[in-house]
Every structure is written in C-alpha cells, then in structure tokens.
Image (cartoon, grey):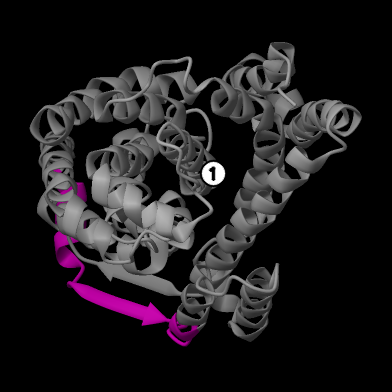
Amino acid sequence: MEPSIVSILPFIFLLLAIAVMPFAAPKFWHENYHWVSLGLGFITAAYYFLITKGWNVLHSVEEYVMFISLLTSLYIVSGGIFIDIKGLATPFRNVMLLAFGGLLANFIGTTGASMLLIRPFIKTNKLRVTDFHIVFFIFIVANVGGALTPIGDPPLFLGFLKGIPFFWIIDKVFLKWLTALIILLVIFYIYDYINFKKQPEEIEEKEIKAKEKLTIKGSFNFLFLAVIIASVFITKPVFLRESIMLLTAFLSYKLTNSEIHKRNHFNFQPIKEVAWLFIGIFVTMTPALELLRFHSSELGISSPTQYYWLTGSLSGFLDNAPTYLTFLSASMGLYGLDINNISNVLLFIASHEKHVLAISISSVFFGAMTYIGNGPNFMVKSIADHQNVETPGFFGYMLKFSIPILIPIYILIWLLFIA
C-alpha cells in the first residue's frame, strides 16, 4: 500500500532538527536529541503498524541493526588500536595519510578506516588542526575513498549481496575513483599549505625537533578487524553476522589495555549519538523511499545522467545505502527485472552497465555532501567535537565546503564518464 505524502513529515522534521537545533537550542538538543529521534520515529512506526501491519518499518529496523552493528564493532575495535605519528605534520605528509586512508577504506570499509585514522590524524596536526582537516578527512576517507570494492562502502556491499560480482565495481570505477581522489588531495594540499605557512615559527620548530616516529599499540586488534570484515560475507541465518561482529567488539574492548583507550580519548558518546539519530533516520525515511519506489516510472528517470544526479542528491540526505537499493530496484523495474533475482541482476549489468555505474558511484561520492549521508561522517565529526576540534555545522559544512568543492568535481566526473 502506498504511503501518504504526509507520512514523510517526521523525516523532514528530523533533518531540520539535526541541522538547526545544535545552534538554536544547544543545551536542549544535547540532553534530548535521542528523545526527538525516537519520538519522530515512533510517529512513523505507528503509521506503518496501523496501515501495513508494520512490515515496511520492520524491514527498516532490520537494516538499521545490520548498519549499527557494523559501525559499532568497527568503532570499538579501532578504538583499541593506538597509532602515534611524531614529527613535522607537513601538507605532503597529511596528503599521504589521507591517500592511505582512502585506499585502506576499500579493505576495511570507510567506517573502519575512519575510526582507525581520525584520532592519529587529529593528534599529528594538534598544533594547527582546523575545520577543513576534518571535512577533507570525511570527503576522502569516510566516503570517496571506499568506492572501489563492496567492502568499501555499504551501498556497494548491498549491491554485492544482490548479485553484482565482487570485482566488477573495481574494473568499472577505478578511473572515476582515481580522478576524484587526486583532485580532492590536490585541493586539500593547497588548503593545508596555506594553513601551514600561517603557523608561527616556534610551532614549526617544536614539531621539527620531534623525531619522525610511528608507534602502534594494541595491534592484536587488527585480527579482530579481520574477523569483522570476514563476517560481512555471512548472510544466513539472520543476525548471525551481527552477533559475531558485536561479540568480537566485546572481546576487543575487554582485552584492550585501558591505557590505550585513555590515550585514544576513547568513549562511547560518538557511537551513541550515531545510534540514536540513525534509528530515527532509518524509520522516518521509510515512507520517502517507498514513495520513490511507487513513483519511479512517473518521474521519467531512465538515463544514466538522471540516475547519477537523483541518486546522488538523495544520498546526501537519506542514508546512501537504502537510497542505492531504491534506485537500483527502480531502474531494473523499468525493464521488468527483479532485484531479488541474481540472474536478473547479471542481465541488467550486461545490458545497462552505465545505469549501475551511475547509481554506484553517485551513492558513494554524494554520501559526503552532508553529515548524515554516510554513517562514518557523523562519527568523525563527533570524535572531533569531543576533542575540541573546530567543525562546521550542518549548513556550514554544505555551504562552505561540500557544495563549492564537491559539486564541481562531481560535474567533472559526470562529463567525463557518465554524460
């Protein structure tokens, strides 16, 4: 049954609350954001239970459990690995660290790479870290970097589960990934070079005196990371994968020396914020995604260009994983193909390669447009906030950084590879 257009109001109110309340009423928001998220989610859930007996919203809750289990386990395990980088934090070294993070994201996911590297990235730049450091970390490590493999970002993993071959995405996306990554790294280098040259000489001398050194403690947690990544491929029975992930995280937390957690400034507040806010997002966005499915043919969306821009635009404000599935399902439905039939998926890839490519790269790339486009974004911001690092607000992030920097890059990607 098609949901009413009015049913998307809780989702709109939640987005506005996330964007406005931290500035309009910071004390109230800090103390009550979880109740706002749960309350708006409850309104949507009640609507679905009355209209459709709850099936659609229960499916969203199931996806949320999968989503938050992965994020929580990666957050806890990576928090048990202490990486200390000493020496002069030059723009070139920062670029190399971000490039490494972007590559690593394809092996341990954007969440894993972000949680592993954000703390050492902040610490090595502690004398001059500012908002653009955090924003470009989100752009590169938490989003664009993870476009090469199904492990890299949740949308691509969902596509893999539906039948898209594991190595198909690497072959088709590599040049787009490399182009976007290089441009972002060059822009970051310019920003960072200007910032670096503004620092007082005594700060630079203090950093130079510190010998170049890399220290890693709690390295046994890399084995726990490997267990979590391997468990990603378990699909049945339901929630076995999530149980393994959370058990692994529990063991990691208990076995990790408390001194490592202390030096990492590790606490559960960032993941708590993500968990509370995203349960509301997953539930309230259900009718919005349903309306898109019902009216996909009426929207006249048929070309790769249309899928690229519409999937991308919504991926910045809806979580990019369900948005990816929605548009992949809608595009296949136009040709009478079923996304739940693997042979249909393979046929669609063979006959409409550019459609799948457009939906894939836009869902990953555009996830960087806002803090809520991809799970790691909000976690990175939260960690930075808790370490007293300057970060832009919801609208500031978009107006100062993502729109002027990312949109021109995405237009170039579209012109070169999609149009």
Residue at (62, 53) in percent of width and height: 271
* Amino acid beneath label 1: Ser
* Left or right, 378 with reference to 349: right
Q: Residues within 10 Å of mark 1 (few under 14, many from 20)?
A: many
Residue 374, position as x, y percentages in the image? 47, 42
* Left or right, 138 with reference to 23: left
Q: Please check the rendered image and state whether residue 210 is part of the magenta-colored stretch, yes or no.
A: yes
Residue 43, position as x, y percentages in the image? 84, 25
Residue 406, position as x, y percentages in the image? 25, 29
Residue 296, compared with residue 146, is above or below; it is above
Residue 47, compared with residue 339, is above or below; it is above
* Farthest-out residue, front: 336
Residue at (65, 77) in percent of width and height: 244
Can residue 119 be seen in the rendering of this structure?
Answer: no
SS at circle 1: helix
221 or 53, nearer to the observer: 53
Residue at (64, 14) in percent of width and height: 24
Q: Please check the rendered image and state whether residue 384 is part of the magenta-colored stretch, yes or no.
A: no
What is the quadrant of residue 401 in the picture? top left
The mark tally for this picture is 1
Residue at (33, 56) in percent of width and height: 121
183 or 160, nearer to the observer: 160
Identify the residue under disc 1: 382
What is the quadrant of residue 309 in the picture? top left
Residue 118, position as x, y percentages in the image? 39, 56
* Left or right, 251 with reference to 389: right
The magenta region covers 201-223
Check the picture and name the quadrant holding the C terminus.
top left
